[in-house]
Image (cartoon, rainbow, N blue to C red):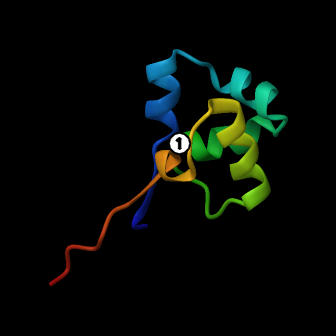
Amino acid sequence: MPIKSNLSRILGERRMKMSELAERAGIAKNTVLTLYHARAKGITFEVMDKICIALDCQPGDLFEYIPDQKE
């Protein structure tokens, strides 16, 4: 998938546990787990908003577009 989650890097830099983010954001631990391990197939704007508020970041900080190199 050409969209990469940067959540694991962000949490590592902030030395924040996944459970702490889930609690601060008011979202399920499993949601954080799937984003952390880049297994999520999608995310709602509501969840993205809660994560951005909890981490004081922008959506572009959480995700990165990796273009396909097939040319």
| Residue sitting at x 69%, y 40% | 51
| Residue sitting at x 43%, y 32% | 9
Residue 63, placed above or below residue 16: below
Residue 59, placed above or below residue 1: above
Which quadrant is the C terminus positioned in?
Answer: bottom left
Q: Is residue 35 left or right of residue 64?
A: right
Q: Is residue 56 left or right of residue 71?
A: right
Which quadrant is the N terminus positioned in?
Answer: bottom left
Residue 28's x, y, as percent? 81, 39
Name the amino acid, label 1: His
Of all residues, the one furthest to the top in this rendering is: 15
Q: Is residue 22 left or right of residue 8?
A: right
Residue 13, placed above or below residue 45: above
Residue 43's x, y, as percent? 68, 59
Q: Nearer the viewer, residue 16 or 56?
A: 56
Label 1 sits on residue: 37
| Residue sitting at x 73%, y 60% | 45
Q: How many marks?
A: 1
Q: Nearer the viewer, residue 64 or 68?
A: 64
Question: Dot 1: what SS?
Answer: loop
Mark 1 Cα within 10 Å, few/some/many (few <14, many 20+)? few
Of all residues, the one furthest to the bottom in this rendering is: 71
| Residue sitting at x 52%, y 46% | 62
